[in-house]
Image (tube, rainbow, N blue to C red):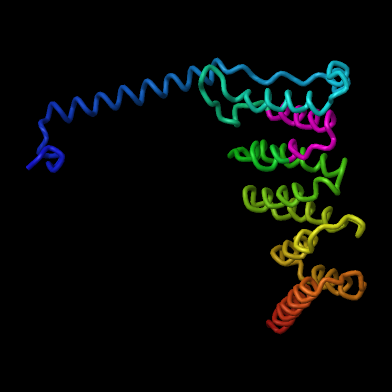
Amino acid sequence: MSLRERKLSQLPTMLVIGLVLFFSVQLAFHHQNRQASVASFSQLKAPLDVEFYRSISLGSGQLMSYLLTIGLQLHDNQKGQHISYSHLDYQRLSDWLLTLYRLNPESEYPGFLAARVYSQVKSDVQIRQMVAVISELFRLNPAQHWRRMTEACLLLKHQLNDLPAALEVAERIAALPGTIKIPFWARDMKLVLLDELNELESAQLLISSMLQSGEIEDRDEIRFLQSRLLKIQQSLLKSKQKP
């Protein structure tokens, strides 16, 4: 029988002890090295006023924004080590993302970073800070950032399990004027959340008014709303029939 076919119990005791000690030392070394890296981590500095960056950009705010964004994204890599995003100062991170956007308002990248990158942490507080960044970007330019707003809604719903806050975000999306073209699934997120929150009468009233307004022309959306309305009406009827 070859060595690789032997059971662990058949190996020499000293060899097993040696292997255990070797891996224990390796784990301890990596843990200590990681702790030392976190301890020596250089925290984000607050961004300067956006006008300062404009003044030194030589008329190219877009290029300056690009360079500053690279610096921001490289900040979590220090001394050859990747530091978890959770160690970043998220208030300063929020300030940086908004500064980058104001420097280059045509860019959607700060919103992308907030929704897809820096929201991937376990801290509820830090996730909410990224949702606040997205919300501010949406306020500044809803036509540009409505998609990130839907992602903020999903962050609140699935990662934080905060349906009321998700509904508030969905209501802001649904309240967008018809001149801003967004797919019906984005506007209808409010209906889904009302349903999940058991706000059936509010959902019924909203769907009925949407169908009666005549503003919806997409046949798929009309069918979706009609099926949703029927489901809600059936649920309301069952609840009234209960003793």
Which image quarter: residue 212? bottom right
What residue is shown at x 56% (from left), y 30% (from top)? Answer: 84
Q: Is residue 190 above or below residue 149?
A: below
Which image quarter: residue 2? top left
Q: Is residue 94 above or below residue 79?
A: below
Please state the extent of the stretch shown in magenta in the rendering: 90-111
The x and y percentages for residue 121 are 60, 38
Q: Can you say which quadrant of the picture contains the N terminus? A: top left
Q: Is residue 165 left or right of residue 13?
A: right
Q: Main secondary structure of the magenta part?
A: helix
| 103 is within the stretch colored magenta | yes
The x and y percentages for residue 20 are 24, 28
Which image quarter: residue 213? bottom right
Q: Residue furthest left?
A: 1
168 or 93: nearer the eye? 93
Q: Is residue 85 left or right of residue 198?
A: left
Q: Is residue 70 left or right of residue 1?
A: right
What residue is shown at x 71% (from left), y 84% (from top)? Answer: 241
Q: Can you say which quadrant of the picture contains the C terminus? A: bottom right
What residue is shown at x 67% (from left), y 53% (from top)? Answer: 157
Q: Is residue 55 above or below residue 178?
A: above
The x and y percentages for residue 238 are 70, 81
Q: Is residue 210 left or right of residue 63?
A: right
| 216 is within the stretch colored magenta | no
